Image (spheres, helix red, strand yellow):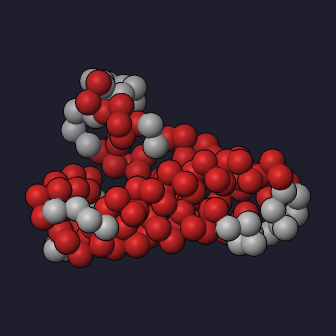
């Protein structure tokens, strides 16, 4: 069962990710192409995907993860692993995007602030996972 102190980070992250996924359901072709281009620049294996399919898949993934975080009957250890994988991909996007970091540093440039903010999701995932493991929930 979810512990009360786990509920708040799960709700915060889940609501944010769910909202992002719902917003992506209605992006136009230009926005889909921009999102796809940015992702493919960081992760070249995505280059072969059609932009609309990529955004649809990303949207569905965000919706599923957001709901999983919000509903309390899904074990925290499972959602922490899913959130860790998802947020790790976002941080990878931040680190690999040219101009997102200051030269020779991982500190964000003014243009990279929007991507760097996703690091808080890694912290939530790690905290939830460590809390679950320390309670013997594996």
On screen, residue 32 above or below 98? below
Q: Nearer the viewer, residue 91 or 115?
A: 115
Tell me the residue at 67%/67% (across/down).
71
Left or right of residue 130: residue 89: left
Question: Residue at the location (45% across, 56% down)?
Answer: 19
Quadrant containing the N terminus is bottom right
Q: Seen in the image, is 105 located left or right of residue 13?
A: left
In the image, residue 2 sits, relative to residue 130, either above or below, namely below
Q: Residue at x 31, y 67 (%)?
A: 25
Quarter of the image for residue 133 reads: bottom right
Q: Position of residue 56 (x, y in %)?
A: 30, 72
Image location of residue 18, percent across then percent down = 48, 60
Horizontal arrangement in the rendering, residue 25 relative to residue 11 (left or right): left
Give the image location of residue 60, x and y in percent.
40, 72
Number of numbered labels in the structure image: 0
Residue 55 percent across, percent down from the top left: 27, 67
Q: Is residue 36 visible?
A: no
- Image quadrant where one finds the C terminus: bottom right
The front one of 72 and 38 is 72
Residue at the far left: name it. 30
Q: Is residue 16 left or right of residue 106?
A: right
Q: Taking the image as drawn, is residue 118 in sight?
A: yes
């Amino acid at each position: 069962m979810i512990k009360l102190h786990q509920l708040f980070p799960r709700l915060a992250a889940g609501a944010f990710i769910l909202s992002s996924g719902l917003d992506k359901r209605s992006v136009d072709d230009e926005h889909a192409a921009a999102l796809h281009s940015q992702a493919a620049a960081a992760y070249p294996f995505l280059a072969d995907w059609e932009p609309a399919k990529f955004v649809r898949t990303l949207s569905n993934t965000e919706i599923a993860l957001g709901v999983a975080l919000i509903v309390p009957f899904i074990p925290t250890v499972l959602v922490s692993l899913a959130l860790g994988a998802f947020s790790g991909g976002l941080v990878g996007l931040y680190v690999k995007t040219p101009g997102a970091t200051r030269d020779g540093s991982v500190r964000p440039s003014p243009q990279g602030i929007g991507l760097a903010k996703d690091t808080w999701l890694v912290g939530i995932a790690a905290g939830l996972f460590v809390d679950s493991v320390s309670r013997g929930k594996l």
